[in-house]
Image (cartoon, rainbow, N blue to C red):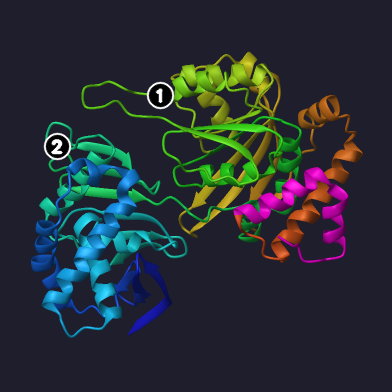
Amino acid sequence: MKGVLESYSFNSGGIPVMVTITLKKEDFVPTYTVKIPGIAAGTKAFIETKLKSELISRIDLDISDILNPKKSEEIKKRFFKVAKEVIREYLKEESEKKVNLLASYLVQNTIGLGELEIVLADENLEEIAVNNSKEPVWIYHKKHGWCITNLKIKNEDTIYDLASTIARKVGRQINVLNPLLDAHLSTGDRVNSTLFPISSFGNTITIRKFSKNPWTVTTLVNNKTISSEVMALIWLAIQNELSLIVTGGTGSGKTSFLNAISSFIQPTHRIVSIEDTRELTLPKYLHWVPLVTREPNPEGKGEVSMLDLLVNSLRMRPDRIIVGEIRRKREAEILFEAMHTGHSVYATLHADNAEQTISRLTTPPIDLPREVLDALAGIVVQLRHRRFNIRRTIEFAEVHKNGKLNMIYQWDAKNDIIKQVNPLERISDLLNLYAGLSPKEIEKEVEEKKKIIEWMVENKYFGIDEVGHIVANYYRDPDYVIEFVEKKKKWIF
């Protein structure tokens, strides 16, 4: 007896897709079943074995055109047009709607990622994992965690071909001599691939999906990742240009959290972001320049490192600097130097708690002197609780001189709430120094922002531009926004 956990549908490049997630009594993980209405198994096989080669033979394209991301839409249109002609020749009786469906599927299997292309369009997925050709594809679902699918890659050569195509599109190689690939698709999705025998069971592909609808402060409060009170305090800190670091383990939501709180930056400030792979999506109302690193080419030339971008960003007159992740000593030194010279900085770091964050910053390989840490105002710690499939902000600590910490908020796991455990000290002093705010005024500001956040949550303003629009208006005319909140009026976008 199958227990259906969830069913939904989505569109993948003109292909309607049905998804059913089930959990049998004897299974340990859910099964994610993909079905394309209107395309039978026999038709799929015919497309993949016969029509695919027919389509390729009819289109005369230079390989550089196919690999050029700027020409991807133009190439798709050309392939789609010829695909329709090919299908019409073999399936003369089919309707226009059916021909369009089959042509879309044929194009995806010819110049796309085949079966993987279909699930890439599912916004509910965070990860897609191919472990080898012997077992089904796995996916990580935002709601149900790891699921096994009904999709399977035909053989090891097909996995290698997919990885090789991705590599060529970004000017990289993956082969016996270079069996590891870390790259990204034109959509921003991050791809890692390994080849046998480095991966003992076969060739692998792991795709971390780039969220087109990123988490916002309201999403985080609504799903209990953080309380409105703590988020309001973070808002006040960012408004007054205090520097923060977001830490946590792998998959804890560090970058998503950093992305969300970036909405609190004033539209009048210039933001420069630096990442290895584009993951940030900021509101369109912000003055934002995104920079991305570049790997060296096969000859070892043309690399643009995070350090290069960090040094260069200081010449771009930024008011705020956002860094995807601190990894090396020189990067951290430049970052903290930027803080000391008047830039407010926001970054992520791998660490499981606030104390470990200080330890990582002050020991090799980063190894900063403790004396520089007072440029940092606070540390926000994220946790991914795999057992319950939840993410939570578990600590918010302020940083004192020499890296000493004052824990302000801490997560109570038993009751699933975040509690204030100590009063503000250094952040209170900084807000008094830079903004002239007394402890009572700070309390009033936090309460006001808390009400705005809760009003946005209540009205389901979860879009990145919706939140950005309201925050931008708050900076321009706070009383105008407060009037909407107090009267519980709907916002007009």
10 Å crowding of disc 2: few (<14), some (14-19), many (20+): some
State which quadrant residue 177 falls in. Answer: top left
10 Å crowding of disc 1: few (<14), some (14-19), many (20+): some
- Image quarter where the C terminus lies is bottom right
- Image quarter where the N terminus lies is bottom left
Residue 402 picture location, percent across and down: 66, 18
Q: Is residue 151 visible?
A: no
Disc 2 residue type (three-letter):
Asn
Camera-side residue: 266 or 329? 266
Residue 233 picture location, percent across and down: 75, 42
| Residue drawn at the location 31% of the way across and 64% of the way down | 118
Say which element carries label 2. loop
Cα separation, mark 1 vs mark 2, equals 24 Å
In this picture, residue 378 sits left or right of residue 56: right
| Residue drawn at the location 15% of the way across and 57% of the way down | 133
Which comes before the other along the chain, label 1 or label 2?
2
Residue bounds of the magenta highlight: 464-493
In this picture, residue 254 sits left or right of residue 9: right
Report the disc number at residue 175. 2
* 80 to 183, vertically: above or below: below
In this picture, residue 434 sits left or right of residue 114: right
| Residue drawn at the location 67% of the way across and 53% of the way down | 467
Q: Is residue 489 magenta?
A: yes
Say which element carries label 1. loop
Whether tag 1 and tag 2 are in contact, CB under 8 A, the answer is no
Q: Is residue 267 visible?
A: yes
Q: Which residue is mark 1?
A: 305
Q: Is residue 219 magenta?
A: no
